[in-house]
Image (cartoon, rainbow, N blue to C red):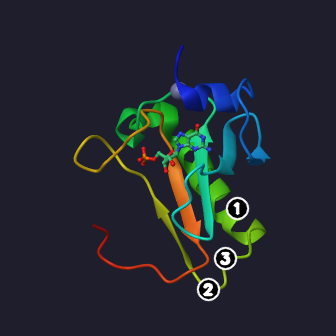
């Protein structure tokens, strides 16, 4: 499987991993859009959040969101506030087709996003 995030989850290619467990991996975005920019992914390949609907994936998606909150705490951005984003498909600008949550913080965010 040529998916770059699958390879990061399996530690086959390097990334700055900040958290790893049996379901999820979190690592620093290679092109950060904020002082803290971490990606939280499932270790298993799912194309996007839209691929993760249904009972089978409820526990996994809940876990990924909890990891996002835990990362925000670990990176000390929780107190000032932070953003969790997932892009789904072309119109949203998804560029890597493996489900990922962006955890962004360390600066004020604009709303609405572009
Ligand atoms: P998307 O545009 O799909 O929502 O987000 C994909 C994110 O993955 C982008 O922010 C991009 O910078 C990041 N990214 C793409 N390839 C790599 C990589 O090889 N390593 C890391 N750490 N981040 C990557
Ligand atoms: Zn993948």
Q: Quadrant of residue 112?
A: bottom left
Instruction: Check if mark 2's residue and mark 3's residue have beta carbons within 8 Å.
Output: yes
Instruction: Compare residues 47 and 66 and report the one nearer the observer.
Output: 47
Dot 1 and dot 2 residues touching (CB under 8 Å): no
Q: What is the distance, in whole Å, between disc 1 and disc 2 at their CAs?
A: 14 Å
Q: Residue under label 3, please give it.
A: 77
**Of callouts 1 and 3, the N-terminal one:** 1
Residue 56 in the image, given as x and y percentages of width and height: 49, 31
Could you tell me which residue is drawn at 76 percent across and 48 percent down? 19
Decide if ligand 1 comes within 8 Å of the CB at mark 2. no
The N terminus lies in quadrant: top right
> Does the beta carbon of the residue at mark 1 sit less than 8 Å from ligand 1?
no
Horizontal side of residue 53 vs 78, given as left or right: left
CA–CA distance in space, label 1 to label 3 = 9 Å
Gap in angstroms between the C-alphas marked 2 and 3: 6 Å
Q: Disc 1 marks which residue?
A: 71
Residue at 56% over, 28% down: 4
Q: Is residue 104 above or below residue 42?
A: below
Q: Which residue is mark 2?
A: 80
User: Is 73 placed above or below 4 here?
Assistant: below
Q: Where is 107 relative to 75, above or below?
A: below
* Residue 38 on image: x %, y %: 62, 56
Q: Which mark is residue 32?
A: none
| Residue 69 image offset from top left, x and y in percent | 64, 64
Q: Secondary structure at mark 3?
A: loop
Task: Residue lying at the far front in this picture: please name it.
Answer: 31
């Amino acid at each position: 499987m040529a998916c770059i995030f699958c390879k990061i989850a399996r530690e086959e290619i390097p990334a700055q991993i900040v958290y790893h467990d049996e379901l999820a991996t979190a690592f620093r975005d290679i092109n950060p859009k904020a002082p803290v920019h971490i990606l939280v992914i499932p270790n298993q390949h799912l194309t996007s959040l839209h691929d993760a609907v249904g009972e089978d994936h409820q526990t996994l998606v809940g876990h990924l969101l909890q990891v996002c909150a835990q990362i925000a705490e670990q990176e000390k951005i929780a107190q000032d506030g932070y953003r969790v984003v997932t892009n789904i498909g072309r119109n949203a600008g998804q560029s890597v087709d493996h489900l990922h949550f962006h955890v962004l913080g360390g600066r004020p965010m604009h709303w609405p996003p572009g």
